[in-house]
Image (spheres, helix red, strand yellow):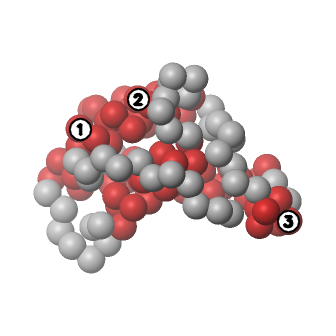
Amino acid sequence: MSSSKEVTLPFTREAALQVLEWGAEPDSSPHSHKQIAEWCDRFWCQYIDADAPPEIEKLLPVLTDVETQWDLYLANTYSLEELRSRSFEGVVLPPEWFKQWLRTAQAGEGR
């Protein structure tokens, strides 16, 4: 899979909510679901070996779920050859998933 243009927001709660809102409205989003999943991955990787503030700690399960579901969706939808050769910029996850992730993140519950 090739890399795509990165979401360049800081790793904050507000930015995470913005990114999830973009995912929930893919037709008006400035970023693809691939870019959003990659940003979520980079965000939670920042805290693999570090203690996160409580407001970030609550977001990490949601961000991990976004990235994991992206990977699972691709693995279950495309062949190994396609996974190696396509960019996936046009792939759209169900917006309902992002709406649920957004609700969970706004509630501060995580999973």
Residue hosting label 1? 14
Q: Can see residue 96?
A: no
Q: Amino acid at mark 1?
A: Glu
Residue hosting label 2? 21
State the residue in front, 29 or 66.
Answer: 29
Q: Amino acid at mark 3?
A: Glu
The residue carrying pointer 3 sits among few (fewer than 14), some (14 to 19) or many (20 or more) residues within 10 Å by Cα, namely: few
Write down the quadrant of residue 72 in the picture. Answer: bottom right
Badge count: 3
Which element is circle 1 on? helix
Left or right: residue 4 compared with residue 109: right
Q: Amino acid at mark 2?
A: Glu
Left or right: residue 1 compared with residue 53: right
Which element is circle 3 on? helix
Percent position of residue 40, x then y: 42, 53
* Residue at image point 62% right, 32% down: 94
Residue hosting label 3? 81
* Residue at image point 68% right, 63% down: 1
The residue carrying pointer 2 sits among few (fewer than 14), some (14 to 19) or many (20 or more) residues within 10 Å by Cα, namely: some
Q: Residue furthest front?
A: 5
State the residue in front, 10 or 111.
Answer: 10
* Residue at image point 79% right, 49% down: 77
Q: Earlier in the sequence, mark 3 or mark 2?
A: 2
Q: Can see residue 16?
A: yes
The residue carrying pointer 1 sits among few (fewer than 14), some (14 to 19) or many (20 or more) residues within 10 Å by Cα, namely: few
